[in-house]
Image (cartoon, grey):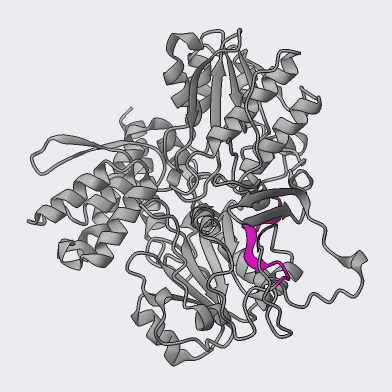
Amino acid sequence: MALFSLMACVRPSLICKASFKSYNNGTYELDSAYIRRAAVIADKSAGFTSPHPNFGCVIATAPGHIVGEGFLYAQGTKPAEVQAVEAAGECCRGATAYLNMEPGDCHGDHTAVSALVQGGVKRVVIGMRHPLPHLRGNAVRALRSQGVQVHVLGEDLKSKPTEEAQKACLLVNAPLICRAALRLPFSVLKFAMTLDGKIATSSGHSAWISSKQSRKLVLELRGRNDAIIVGGNTVRRDNPRLTARHGGGHTPVRIVLSQTLNLPEEANLWDTSEVSTIVVTQRGARRSFQKLLASKGVEVVEFDMLNPRDVMEYFHDRGYLSILWECGGTLAASAISSGVIHKVFAFVAPKIIGGKSAPSPVGELGMVEMSQAIDLIDVCYDQIGPDMLISGLLRSLSDLTPVIPSVDETFAVDPTVSPYESSIIFFYKTWDPYGAFSNFSPHPIQMPDGNGDYVTWFSVEHYYQAHKFVGVNDPFAHNCVERIKSAKSPEEAARIGRSMQRQKRDLVRPDWDNIKIEVMYRALKCKFSIYPHLNNMLISTAGSVLVEAAPHDLFWGGGRDGEGLNYLGRLLMQLRSEFLGEESSSVDND
């Protein structure tokens, strides 16, 4: 069973069946088959890393033989195109590369494009242009300028098979499309109900409506999201843990929406030793209870008026791409009415419980006629054990695909249009316009160890997290350093470091709070010193304030309302000043 992402559906892979086969009745069919394959492998990291733009690359020779494949494992890791070119080797020359989405270069080095060109790829077929405006069209133009033939589905190639392949590409990156078009995380409403539409008995008992097979699938579905949302009623009634798949991998944040904070003092969600919990509430609600939650490590975020759209806009700014709603009917109805739900997963169990007061999955929506009912789009059906899984979109993804010109295309028409505020430059995720400034960017650094020997670190974040434990005379601390150093992505390095810091405070070096800024500074200086294009990018921001835009990080980031200390931005501005000073001295000496 092949799969593209949770955006489609079913089976343990959560997607409609889309078998890959080589058609023999035309180039369009063959191209479409390989594009669908690229979409399938683009989804391979789902559940193991936090949601990120999904890239897959398939390289095939003229007779239709696959010689190389690759997919982006996590933000800040080796591009899919580079992996595929490396796997193909000399077979790359004269071959065709199939990409589910246009490469995104936020790091100034055109890694993906360079790999394809230097590998000798003759033709590139792209499933869809990049949906983010600052990246849209850049790689297509770069490839064509290097003499590579580029075909984009829906533009250069149009047929029934290419339409289906393009849909697969939209599905695998639905969260990114939603982010670009709506500035909201892609939200999925999940519920389990009986055949007569009940999510619990009249007494509130609900364990278990769905089968073991369905519940196992839910664990996988959770792992594909940045966060899981429940309401106060769910916390009080079910006391859930909201864990994801077993055996490690990505652990989504738990979010509780409660207007009054009428919540129990003891709950499984208040245990943040392994997974973070965020409680979102109305400003001023139960200050004493907020302090209790803070003492347990639970983050509390206040809103002047608590409504789903404002909450989703906040988590969009926080960098979340996809969110799973596992709430009761009242909150589900509010979320649907607010327009923040984009897909539904309904597990229907062959059971009947009745009950006039038994709750249903969606509360009052104000509809009085069937003509007002919401019709799902691209509906999928699959049997999971004894249950039936029905899923579908509330809005077509093709309607969300950006059709506006890219920033470069707009600027070519009207040079007075500036896409960014010149006085303040924000950066956060590696796919942002200035993603290279992030400590998660995929730029290895070489730093001296205690013996003066140079050691290669995969990213600044790897180096920073490991140095929480460097120098501590304990075998567990040494093991932690090695685990961080060998982590497959900056995300995993951060997860290991933060988890160990929470669970084993005695392993953290005693002077960490005093030296962590210096540790980050050394790593950043190395990064921007050894990569000329990054140095030029940093210097080009002269005169602008650099702000790390994480709304929840009040130390390294700027915070939600500018209350953060923004130490990452400060360090980059300090380095920029030093580099500009060196340039000035060099000119004076000349």
- Which of the two residues, 148 or 236, is positioned nearer the viewer here? 236
Q: Looking at the picture, does residue 351 appear above or below residue 426?
A: below
Q: Residue at x 25, y 60 (%)?
A: 500
Q: Residue at x 52, y 75 (%)?
A: 256
Say whether residue 323 is left or right of residue 451. Answer: right
Q: Is residue 137 something one can see in this rendering?
A: yes
Q: Is residue 192 magenta?
A: yes
- Which of the two residues, 146 or 329, is positioned nearer the viewer here? 329
Locate residue 66, reporting x and y percent.
53, 16
Q: Looking at the picture, does residue 588 appear above or below residue 321?
A: above
Q: Is residue 106 magenta?
A: no
Locate residue 582, reporting x and y percent.
32, 39
Q: Is residue 110 something one can see in this rendering?
A: no
Q: Residue at x 57, y 88 (%)?
A: 260
Locate residue 392, reporting x and y percent.
72, 53
Locate residue 279, reporting x and y percent.
49, 76
Which quadrant holds residue 340? bottom right
Q: In the picture, which quadrant includes the C terminus?
A: top left
Q: Looking at the picture, does residue 557 appear above or below residue 124?
A: below
Say whether residue 537 is left or right of residue 343. Answer: left
How many numbered marks, from 0 up? 0
- Which of the two residues, 195 or 329, is positioned nearer the viewer here? 195
Q: Looking at the picture, does residue 162 appear above or below residue 485?
A: above
Which quadrant holds residue 362? bottom right
| Magenta extent | 180-197
Say whether residue 241 is left or right of residue 306. Answer: left
Q: In the picture, which quadrant includes the N terminus?
A: top right
